[in-house]
Image (cartoon, rainbow, N blue to C red):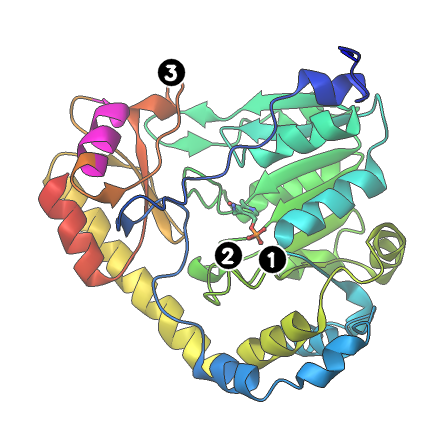
Amino acid sequence: MKNNKSYFRKNIDEMDGYTPGEQPRDMKYVKLNTNENPYPPSPAVMKALKSLDAGRLRLYPDPLACELRKTIADIFGLKSESIIVGNGSDDILTITTRAFAGEKDSIACFEPSYSLYPVLAELQGCRCIKIPLGYDGDFYIPSDSAKKANGAKLFYIARPNAPTGTLFPIGEIRKICRNFKGIVFVDEAYADFADDNCVGLLEEFPNLIVGRTMSKSYSLAGLRLGFALASGKIIEGMMKVKDSYNVGMPVQVLATAALKDRKYFNETREKICRTRRYLVKSLLEKGFEVCGSQSNFVFAAPPDKDGEGVYRRLKKNGVLVRYFKGPVTGRYVRITVGTDKEIRILLRNI
Ligand code: PMP
């Protein structure tokens, strides 16, 4: 029997869904399009993987991920009660959206920023207040942002921003936390590659949540582990929203091992920051305009401002970067900082 009736909620029928970066299977590319880390995870992760007790898979994992949360808490000088972990930071963003914004409420975010934020609003049946970033050759937070966002329950701010790499001044974030009436979620997916972060603001602002991921600076995108830091009261509420067992036992064990290896973490992120400086310098020498980047990617516009042209040319030559359509973003490509060797191949073909 033919039946054209849709069983979905109206907002699901009407939305497109999030488009992740290409994960090609057709050929081997120099893959600089999804901000993965080019270095392997810490050897401590490999060791923990080999000694995993498969027999324990019979049992549910620790729903409170006690050891993992304690390890994170120690690194940031916080209490475990201030930490929630999730299946990647995308899970943390979903938990946050569900916890703070109901149907018909609003969520605010900047544009351009991480394109998942408006999708989360659509999923929830929320309105999304998109606040255009100021642009003067680089991107900046407009001075009246908190006012424009007010009325929203939640304000998503990526810092460093994606896809631009911008580290907005911490004073701007402080101003938003002070003047915005709802929850401010500072998404610090890339903060390990930056000069500073907003963790220190948590003491000051009860409406602040800071999000982190192990996908970039810990080379663990395939593991799926993200976390958020906030007051005990905020985390307690978010714990009610998460799936009981949202982080599996192997993930808890391997993430804990990676976090404990501070030496490897510091060495890797320093290597990436060094290569970033080399990439920026080389692009500037080629006449590109490069946004100030404090992350593991660089947003760069060629002299003819044809970002799509650069993307296509590189792809034809086996190098994948990311291109974002749009009047301003379309001038640029976003290039993940790979190894020095990968960046040399990119520079030869750009
Ligand atoms: N936040 C930002 C700003 C990102 O760019 C990404 C990566 N796409 C994420 C969060 C999600 O990262 P993950 O789910 O791998 O932790």
* Residue placed most toward the observer, 299 or 177: 299
> Looking at the magenta stretch, what is its main secondary structure?
helix
Q: What amino acid is found at the position of numbered circle 1 in the picture?
A: Arg
The kind of secondary structure element at disc 3 is loop
Please report the residue visible at 75 percent of the width from the left and 35 percent of the height from the top: 154
Disc 1 designates what residue?
Answer: 212
For badge 2, the amino acid type reads Ala
Q: Is residue 186 visible?
A: yes
Q: Nearer the viewer, residue 122 or 270?
A: 122
Q: Which residue is painted at 40% across and 51% down in the image?
A: 294
**What percent of the width, then of the height, locates residue 336?**
34, 49
Magenta part of the chain? 305-315
As helix, strand or loop, the secondary structure at mark 2 comes to helix
What residue does disc 3 label?
Answer: 327
Image quarter hosting the C terminus: top left
Q: Residues within 10 Å of mark 1 (few under 14, many from 20)?
A: many
Residue tagged 2? 191
Say whether disc 3 or disc 1 marks the residue closer to the N-terminus. 1
Q: Are marks 2 and 1 in contact (CB under 8 Å)?
A: yes
> Amino acid type of disc 3?
Pro
Mark 2–mark 1 Cα distance, whole angstroms, equals 8 Å
